[in-house]
Image (spheres, grey):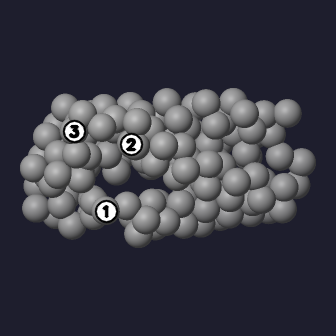
Amino acid sequence: MVSFLSYLAVSLVLLLVGLFLMEITTKVKEFSLMAKGNKAASYVLGGRLLGLAIVLYSTVANSISLTDMALWGAVGILAQIIVFYLAEWLTPRFNVTQSIEEDNQAVGLFLMFLSVSIGLVIAGCLTY
């Protein structure tokens, strides 16, 4: 029971830290936009949350200790942020920030699926 609670607590902290880091490192402020009813922002944020959760699931399932899980969880979060930026950079046909601020739901859904896809790939890379 203690192990379960420890892994759960560390995972939830890492999830919140990852979400916070994504929020402060990106131009779009999804929480503010969601408060105004922007659905595209909620898709983006939900996708990021799910992508991070997938990465953290993999670290919990494959770790040999709580420290191992926390370290690989941090690596996974960093990888998620970096790969998301690379993918965003490789989509020059539209301005991501402007599209989300204008509530372009097609772009929001694309970014949601992109975050989930990136999370799945990173999670697979974290298995050993």
Element type at mark 1: loop
Element at label 3: loop
Return the mark for residue 94.
3
Q: Which residue is mark 2?
A: 88
Residue at 89% across / 48% down in the picture? Answer: 64
Q: Residues within 10 Å of mark 1 (few under 14, many from 20)?
A: few
Task: Give amino acid for label 3.
Answer: Phe
Q: Which residue lies at the image location 34% right of the left edge and 35% below the top edge?
A: 91
Q: Residue 49, how many percent across, how many down?
A: 44, 49
* Residue type at tag 2: Glu
Type of amino acid under label 1: Lys
- The residue drawn where x is 48% and y is 43% is 86
Q: CA distance from mark 2 to mark 3?
A: 10 Å
Residue 102 is situated, as x and y percent measured from the top left of the image, at 10, 50
- Residue at label 1? 27
Residue density around tag 3, few if under 14, some if 14–19, many if 20 or more, within 10 Å: few
